[in-house]
Amino acid sequence: MSRPIEEFKRTLESVAAIANAQLTGDPTTVITGITLSSNSVQEGDLFIALPGEKTHGAEFATDAIARGATAVLTDEAGAAKISGVPVIVSSNPRRAAGVISAWFYSEPMRDLYSVGVTGTNGKTTVTTLLHQIMSLAGRESGLIGTVETRIGEEVIASKRTTPESSDLQALSAMMRERHMRNLVMEVSSHAIALERIRGSHFAVVAFTNLSQDHLDFHKTMEAYFATKAKLFTFEFADLAVINIDDAYGLKLKEITELPVMTVSRHDQSATWHYASITKDYVGAHVAIRGGGGILIEGKVHLHGGYNFDNLLMAVAIATESGIDPIDIAAILPQLTGAAGRLESVRLGQKFTALVDYAHSPDAVTRVLETAHEISGGRVIAVLGCGGDRDASKRALMGKALQEGADVAIFTSDNPRSEKADAILVQMTLGLEIQEPSAVIEDRSAAIKAAVNEAKDGDLVIVLGKGHEKGQEINGVVQPFDDRIELAKAIEDKK
């Protein structure tokens, strides 16, 4: 992971004091960096060894020390495995990692207009649209999210939706160093629960919606919502922007301690709402009302009700950040949305071909509703469910596929350590699948079957993996891009 050019130095005595932790070793030892990955250690780093589900980070401490780590922060169990360098022992090393990382880099997120967006669906599109608006308005901006991380013109591949705390704060410091004015980022529920954002502070936090996902991790919807709600406190932010068309959004509006700016596609009492949406085959003309009588009108090349929700939120935050509504109106036609979100594959074929990241029951239902709005014919949809993830949503996703598509093709996604055929059994449980719908385990073959089934005016949509460029099977990630597979299938048909 890249780091700022500016040199940062802290003594272990000051690190231990900030972390409220116990130091064993020379308190005058200086650290010049922080990392949670032994593979990323640089000379002078503090290596943070966290307890994990299968292994303890302390198992990698010897390697980290060999690479140049001058000290280790861990818990009591980890400390017992470490020798040769000073050790800081914390009762909660995850929380300490966030606090220390933000402090080490002098709280860079407070020096930027930082925006954090959370919710089950829409995070990537909201952040992408907001980043595009800011950039097109002449504001140098950083972006951190599922698809990619951007620091001005530099693009860095993202490993996860929200980076570990040491990487997040280093990236923010790089943005500050390069005179970025804004940071727009996705905040996942895992990042909140695992303390990756501890020490962070946002000018604005935004909530899109909540529907069933990640219950393998959170166990219940109540716990999932409670995790999201932790972000909406003065510890992390100054202002909340909440979609009140969502039932959980309404609940969050009532319980958050933050001042709230509401957005709604349907409720004109919301701070930000639509005066009108006039759709056509290439998108829509929108008229957006904001606080103080603001009116922003323009043409957008977006489809689907949920994308209008995403646009509304992005416009509301952009205006709140100080961008002139007149400039935003001029920018609207230039917005392109996020990679792998209703992304079109065009090779001159006489049917529509799209790829979308939808991988929860609600997202599948929404995107297939949008597909019917766009299509002049049948909707032919391909979908699988990921392995080693929330198994309780598989049957719901299968039902959503069958009910939402004219032709439903069930296939594999990222099986990971599970058997793809076993996942498909769970996904199709209780469903009666009749031709031309089918179960085709091989994802490439399933995409080809969907394309071969398409007639003029139909719409083929491949769901679940979106922007991803690999398929994980038995622990090995093999090259696989739905967009490329779809293009190959179309070429072979022509």
Image (spheres, rainbow, N blue to C red):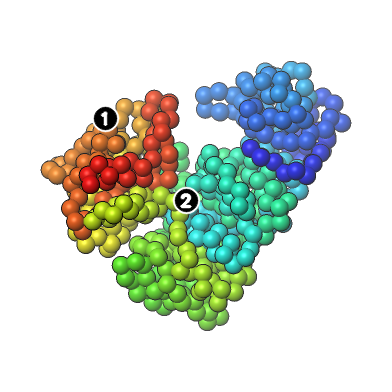
Residue 421 is tagged as 1
Q: Nearer the viewer, residue 236 or 301?
A: 301
Q: Residue furthest bottom?
A: 293
* Above or below: residue 362 compared with residue 42: below
Residue picked out by circle 2: 225
Q: CA–CA distance between discs 1 and 2?
A: 32 Å
Choose mark 1 or mark 2, whichever is in front. 1
Can residue 355 be spotted in the picture? yes
Q: Nearer the viewer, residue 305 or 375?
A: 375
Secondary-structure class at tag 1:
helix
* Above or below: residue 472 compared with residue 153: above
Left/right placement of residue 285 relative to residue 404 reads right
- At 31% from the left edge and 51% from the top edge, which residue is drawn? 347
Tell me where residue 93 appears, x and y as whole percent. Answer: 66, 34
Residue 327 is tagged as none
Q: Give the quadrant of residue 196.
A: top right
Tell me where residue 58 appears, x and y as whole percent. Answer: 64, 23
Secondary-structure class at tag 2:
helix
Chain-order first, disc 1 or disc 2: 2
Q: Quadrant of the N terminus?
A: top right
* Above or below: residue 37 compared with residue 431: above
Left/right placement of residue 141 relative to residue 179 reads left
**Amino acid of disc 2:** Phe
Left/right placement of residue 27 relative to residue 219 reads right
- At 56% from the left edge and 80% from the top edge, which residue is drawn? 292
Task: Sort mark 2 into few (<14), some (14-19) or many (20+) by Cα contacts within 10 Å.
Answer: many
Tell me where residue 186 appears, x and y as whole percent. Answer: 53, 51
All told, the count of numbered labels is 2
Q: Nearer the viewer, residue 241 or 274?
A: 274
**Amino acid of disc 1:** Asp
Can residue 237 be spotted in the picture? no
